[in-house]
Structures are given as structure tokens and as C-alpha cells.
Image: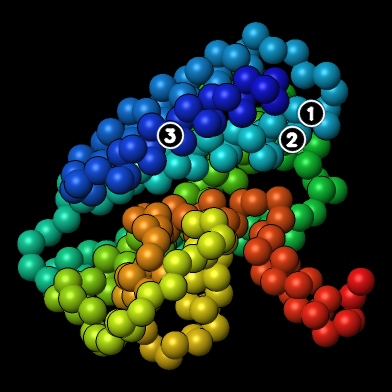
Amino acid sequence: MIEYIAKLRKQTDELIDRIESSDSNALKKSMEASIVLAEAFDKLKQFILSYRFRNEMEEITFFKEIKPKFCYRLIYYRKIYNIEMNRPAGVEKQKEYLNEQLNEINKYNIKRLDFIRYYRSGATYLDSLYFLRGKTDTEQYLETFYYELDPNFSTNCDFKVAKILSNDMLMAYLMQEIERLSNNGLPSVYFRFPTIKLTWQGSKTELMEQLYCWDSAGTFGDVPLTQLSDYIQNVFNIQLEKNLSRAFSDMKIRNVPSPFLDKLKDALLRRMGRRK
């Protein structure tokens, strides 16, 4: 199972990266990405329907971790498509509209706060109730996709996990768009770029992790994330992920949330002689 899913995920990620790196607008990108992800999701479903889980733990792992990570981007891109299709004209109207979308996400999260706390805390004591098939809750049916109604491919909460991850990504997108509108599409502060640039020697993923740390801590003051990203790319001679919200969502679902920061801390402690 792991080999098949890893291969499918790799193929899908490559197609999505190609779509995201294109010059198409958000509407076209979201439509193309939705088609790719829907096809991948259907392939995953067909595989699982013919697969026999070795034990309950493997089944829980699939419905708690694997399926939501396939599903959440499909939810995200479909939502982006609908948002962009119905986006009004005029800066103020758009800001009001996008803020309404943020409010809807907050309402959803508040209604399911207990489960969100359970999931984010890494708890497992209710996993057999939440992530094993055959214990379907009516609420699950009311908020899921029509093709997920198959009881052999659904549990009480796998869709809720995907929705939580999707909402994280969607909130970042909405706030980024509101920020752009507030600045009339331009950065609110202008940096002077250094004459001599240094080339980043680490991976793009590592720099993205560092970028979000700087932004979260307000290291550079009240500077928009998009502007900080542009500056860092220019200074360090590197092209980062265009979709910042997607990059952050991918970071959040890693088994080790901050591997680069952990590596930096370890290197510093070794230099201080406080770690062998």
C-alpha cells in the first residue's frame, strides 16, 4: 500500500507543481488542479476498495493521515475556484467578500473545536471511533463529497481532518489576497536590495521553513509575508514556491514539523560545546 500511495502522491505533486508554476490566473489554476486531484483521489479510492488492511492500526493510519492528505488540496482548489468565480468587482467589495469567507472558516472551526483540539494535539484514544469504517455519523454525510458516501471508503472523521487542513491553506490564501488588495497590489514597504547577493545553499523547503519563522516572530517588523518572500528570494538568489499557503500547509502536516530549525539548533549547540 505504501509504495503505491507514494508513487501516486509523487506523480500528483509533479502535476500540481507544474500547474502552480504556470502564468495562469487563480481561476484556471484551481480548475486544472481540481481535475488532477480528483483523478488521483479516484485512483486512491479504487485501490483501497480492492485492498485488505492488515490490521486496525493500518486502517486508522490510512483514514487519519493518508486519505486526508490526498483530499485536502482537492477541497482547497475547489473552494478557490468557487471563490474566484463569485468574486465581485471593486477593491472594497472584494475585501468584504474575502473577509466573509474567512468568517465562514472560523464558524466551521468553532463548531468543531473539540475535534480540532483532539486532532492537533496528536491524541489517539478515540481513533478507533473516528477512523475505522462501519461507524458512520450522519454529520459526516452532510459535509462530504457525494462520491465519498461509500461506507467502504469513509469514516466518521477523515473528511473533517481534510477540511481542517484545507481551511488552514484557504485562510492563508484569503489573507494574502486581502493584503494585496489593501496595498493596491503593491508592497506597502520597499526594501533596498544589496549589491552583492549570497546564494542559499540549503533546500527550498528549508528556506521556506525559515521564512515562516521570521514572519511568525515578526523579525522584520510589520512586513507582509509576500513582500518578505520576494526580498529573501532576491537576496538569496533562489526561486521559492509561488503558492505560500500551500507551502505552509505542507509544512504543517509533516511528521517532524521543523526539521531545519532542529538542525540549526543542533549545529549551534555543538559549536557552543553543549552537545556532542
Residue to which mark 2 is pinned? 61
Give the numbered dot on residue 14.
3
In the image, is residue 273 above or below residue 175?
Answer: below
Rendering coords of residue 162 (x, y %): 54, 44
Nearer to me, 162 or 206:
206
Quadrant of image for the C terminus: bottom right
Identity of the residue furthest to the top in this view: 50
**Amino acid on which the number 1 mark rests in the picture:** Glu
Query: Mark 3 or mark 1, which is nearer to you?
Result: 3
Q: Quadrant of residue 112?
A: bottom right
Identify the residue at horizontal 72%, vertical 66% (top origin).
263
Instruction: Tell me if residue 111 can be seen.
Output: no
The kind of secondary structure element at disc 1 is helix
Left or right relative to 198: residue 149? right
Q: Earlier in the sequence, mark 3 or mark 1?
A: 3
Question: CA gap, disc 3 to disc 1?
Answer: 27 Å
Whether tag 1 and tag 2 are in contact, CB under 8 A, the answer is yes
Q: Earlier in the sequence, mark 3 or mark 2?
A: 3
The kind of secondary structure element at disc 2 is helix
